[in-house]
Amino acid sequence: MKLACVVHRFGADIAGGSEGHCRLIAEHLAARHDVTVLTTCAKDHITWRNHYPAGETRVEPVSPKPGEGGLRVLRFPVVRERDMRRFMDLSDLVAADRATAGEQEDWFRENGPDAPELLAHLRQHGAGYDRILFWAYRYATSYFGLPLAADRAVLVPTAEDDPLIHVAALEALFARPKAFLFLTPEEETLVAARAPAGRPSAIIGSGLDPAPAAVDVAPLAPLRLADPFVLYLGRIDPNKGCAALIRHFLRYAEGGSKVQLVMAGPASMAIPDHPQIRPLGFVDEPTREALLHRARALIMPSPYESLSMVLLEAWNHALPALVNARCKVLRGQVARADGGLYYGNAMEFIAGLDYLLNHADVAAQMGRQGRDYVDREYRWPIVIEKIETVLAAV
């Protein structure tokens, strides 16, 4: 088949869940299909400032595996940066359930990215693709782009249980795709309440290759990290629960523990200067693998997720997890895998982290159970076969 994957931003140097998910799926589909990624020139998801050159490029897989193909990438310019004041005003109305129909649509427009040439490509050339997969319903590239190719559209909503999922404007959007690809059972339940019954769908999660038995930890040497350390991996952002994570961890450190919190990922918030908190910024793939191999536990504080790929990566390394119980998806993943603990407040965070650090045998068993769960559900042949079945059913 000739496939298109539409995503708001794309690149190996982008730390984002839906963006990384799109890249991995597209790379693996390219082993069997002609795949084109349709995206913007933006790298920064806050401003949508153009960064990459517009036009066509060829991108090879980040970590090539036998059978994986390269990707044709078409980038389209963003014509205006986000008006943060207008966006925040609209977000307040949405959160308070006071947005009119017009204001709900304006929210998607202001959330961006505003790339009219991408929409024009879908309008003029969409019929040239057999299937078009759209990532992340909340972005303008999906909200305004999917209706232009609805007769061949497959939506990967990456929906979270936040105020936006309840706006009336989504009734029309979720009625349009010919099929859905969900990341977790919790996301399927969330979207199914708004979408027509009977559309082809599958819960795919994300695929992983088995972690190597021996991981090179040399990339950690120049970082001079403490031993032991626990790990947060991803965007360092208040919306990801990072401000609460830091508050909880500082209270934990007051109890005398010498464990270090390592935070790896680009930051859009201030990180306190504290000897037991170590921000690393964006890390490359070898460093990422080494961190997952050497950490004592992964901490996932996000209150909203459609799937935590980082959690799956941690379990791939048999690393136990401590996750935010407010997030149904994270709590569900941990419960299904029996791969860690969850917390609902600061005291539970402190108790959970203390337990994982002081009961190494139980923590290791949780990590192994997480890896067994990944083996059952998230190896690439399993994931791609589910996707192929849905693509064939459209």
Image (cartoon, grey):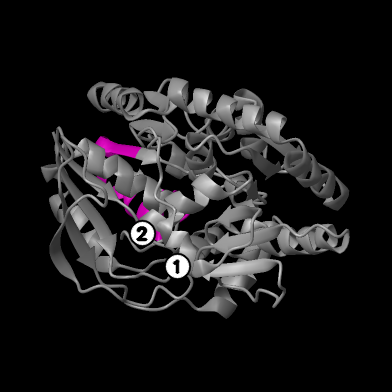
Q: Can you give x and y, in whole percent of width and height, for residue 183 in the image?
A: 47, 35
For the point 40% across and 35% down, the residue is: 213
**As displayed, is residue 105 above or below residue 369?**
below
Mark-to-mark CA distance, 2 and 1: 9 Å
Mark 2 neighbour density, 10 Å: few (under 14) some (14–19) many (20 or more): many
For the point 22% across and 64% down, the residue is: 75
Question: On the image, numbered disc 2 is attached to which residue?
Answer: 8
**As displayed, is residue 394 above or below residue 15?**
above
* In magenta stretch: residue 122: no
Three-letter code, disc 1: His
- Residue nearest the viewer, comparing 233 with 127: 233
Residue range of the region highlighted in magenta in the rendering: 136-154
Asked if the residues shown at circle 2 and circle 1 are in contact, with their CB atoms under 8 angstroms apart, the answer is yes
- Residue nearest the viewer, comparing 49 with 14: 14
Identify the secondary structure beneath mark 1: loop
Which quadrant of the rendered structure holds the C terminus?
A: top left
Quarter of image, res 232: bottom right
Q: Can you give x and y, in whole percent of width and height, for residue 340 in the image?
A: 67, 34
Question: On the image, numbered disc 1 is attached to which residue?
Answer: 45
Which quadrant of the rendered structure holds the N terminus?
A: top left
